[in-house]
Amino acid sequence: MCTRLICLLVVASTLLFMPAHLRGQAVVRDTSAVAATVGAVNKLYTESIGQSSHLFTGTEYLRRATRTNGNAYYLDQELQPGTLWYMGARYESIPMMLDIEKDELVIQDFRKSLLIALFAEEVDSFYLDQHRFAFLPQWISGLSSGYFELPQTGALKLWVKRSKYFEQSAKADENALPGYRYESRYFIQSVNAFKEINTADDLMAIVADRQEAVKEYLKQNKLRFRRDKEAVLSAAVAFYNQIKAAL
């Protein structure tokens, strides 16, 4: 096994001692070979560091043992590859899943023998199926610290807190399985505030300096707050940020 430094030195030395005219031709002909080499080095490094990697720092995670209707996870109850920024390092193609009942980001340990819930305070952000999430501490959100999705960013940031709540079945049948209630809460962050958005008036108050333009944009695109709150908020914030960026 080798450290990242030694692996990179091996790659660098290969190029260094190649004749200059061949080295130049190699770069011109096939720059993809460099990317492939770097990818292979990163893979080798990840495999070699094993248990010593900060990536595998967390607490053991256990799935709910009882049978339920639905599950506690966002998008998928199975691990899926994503990009993760953890303890100051970036990791690509890491199998993850997000438990939005417990608010925990879950990966496998390096032996793939058990599941680990990462330390939330050490998670900067991550992507799951193109959905970007970040950890927000209480002092920013005013809520409990946790993972929030970030669909839009710019002069205004749109945050979504996605949660599931475990509930017993309301059916009289004693064999009915318990299930989950899903909830999304929406927040807009500006320079001076982090505000929950529950009504169209809440939204218009945030975009007050461009309110008429935003209203017209939503009308033209037939977007109505009561029909699809998330689509309206995402479109309105993106449009507002576009206006501000053009100034």
Image (tube, rainbow, N blue to C red):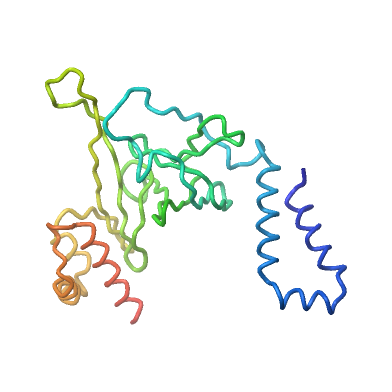
Whole-percent x and y of residue 231? 23, 61
Residue lying at 23% horizontally and 25% vertically, measured from the top left: 177
Q: Residue furthest top?
A: 174
Locate the N terminus by quadrant: top right
Residue lying at 35% horizontally and 77% vertically, measured from the top left: 245
Whole-percent x and y of residue 48? 71, 42
| Residue nearer the viewer, 94 or 145 | 94
Above or below residue 231? Residue 139 is above
Specify whether 114 is left or right of 205: right
| Residue nearer the viewer, 116 or 19 | 19
Whole-percent x and y of residue 187? 27, 54
Whole-percent x and y of residue 178? 24, 26
Specify whether 65 is left or right of 170: right
Specify whether 74 is left or right of 175: right
Locate the C terminus by quadrant: bottom left
Above or below residue 44? Residue 71 is above
Residue lying at 79% horizontally and 63% vertically, measured from the top left: 12
Q: Residue furthest front?
A: 29
